[in-house]
Image (spheres, rainbow, N blue to C red):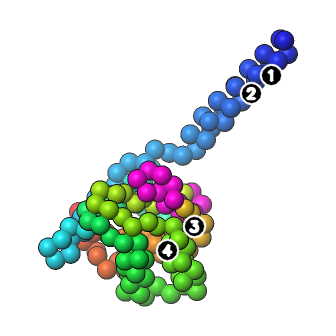
């Protein structure tokens, strides 16, 4: 009986150490900046960027970009807009069509109040969540750079939004 108690205690101690080690590896993220997209007379979404220090550094990982929608938008329109933004930025990657197909399989339609979040981890892998629930991953570092670049790249089509997100204004 004592042997079983010792094994059980060891397992509990080891699992609590593992949880602590993992928790310390993922730093808490602090808000860097926020912005609202308004097109003509319509508010489309509010966005916020989170980094470990609360400061934006282009190559720093991890980071999270939250987008809280202020109107209903179909997944098809989200995919179409992603493609348009990449084209406007002159982005060409042989994997783009594959990424868009993966996003089409992953993303649901969004409704007013939904939050779609992108978490880019230390390895530049992308994890998407909808209202706090993971909906899929893309493990290509090139995808992470291209997708986050819609908002964060110097070549973004919305420089004022970028400035607000990275805390530059």
**Residue 69 falls left or right of residue 142:** left
Please name the residue that numbered disc 1 is placed on.
7
Q: Secondary structure at mark 2?
A: helix
As drawn, the label of residue 138 is: 3
Look at 28% across and 60% down and name the residue there.
Answer: 112
Spatial CA span between label 4 and label 1: 47 Å
84, 31: nearer the viewer: 84
Query: Which residue is more in the foreground, 93 or 97?
Result: 97
Q: Earlier in the sequence, mark 3 or mark 1?
A: 1
Contact between labelled residues 4 and 2, with CB atoms less than 8 Å apart: no
> Is 160 placed left or right of 123 in the picture?
left
- In this figure, which residue is indicated by the disc labeled 2? 11
The answer for how far apart the CA atoms under marks 2 and 1 are is: 6 Å
Name the quarter where the C terminus is drawn. bottom left
Question: Where is residue 162 drawn, in percent x and y?
Answer: 31, 69
**Secondary structure of the residue carrying numbered label 1:** helix
Q: Nearer the viewer, mark 4 or mark 1?
A: 4
Please tell me how crowded label 3 is: few (under 14), some (14-19), or many (20+) other residues with Cα within 10 Å: some
Question: Where is residue 161 shown, x and y percent of the image?
Answer: 27, 69
Residue segment shown in magenta? 122-135
Quadrant in the rendering for residue 51: bottom left
């Amino acid at each position: 009986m004592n042997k079983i108690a010792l094994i059980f205690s060891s397992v509990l101690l080891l699992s609590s150490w593992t949880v602590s080690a993992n928790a310390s590896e993922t730093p808490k993220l602090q808000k860097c900046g926020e912005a609202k997209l308004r097109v003509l007379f319509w508010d489309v979404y509010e966005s916020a960027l989170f980094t470990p220090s609360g400061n934006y550094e282009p190559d720093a990982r991890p980071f999270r970009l939250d987008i809280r929608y202020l109107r209903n938008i179909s997944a098809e329109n989200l995919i179409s807009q992603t493609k348009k933004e990449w084209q406007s930025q002159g982005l060409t990657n042989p994997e783009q069509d594959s990424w868009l197909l993966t996003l089409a399989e992953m993303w649901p339609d969004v409704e007013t109040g939904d939050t779609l979040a992108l978490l880019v981890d230390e390895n530049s892998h992308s994890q998407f969540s909808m209202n706090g629930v993971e909906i899929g991953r893309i493990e290509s570092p090139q995808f992470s750079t291209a997708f986050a670049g819609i908002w964060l790249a110097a070549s973004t089509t919305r420089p004022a939004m970028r400035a607000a997100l990275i805390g530059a204004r």
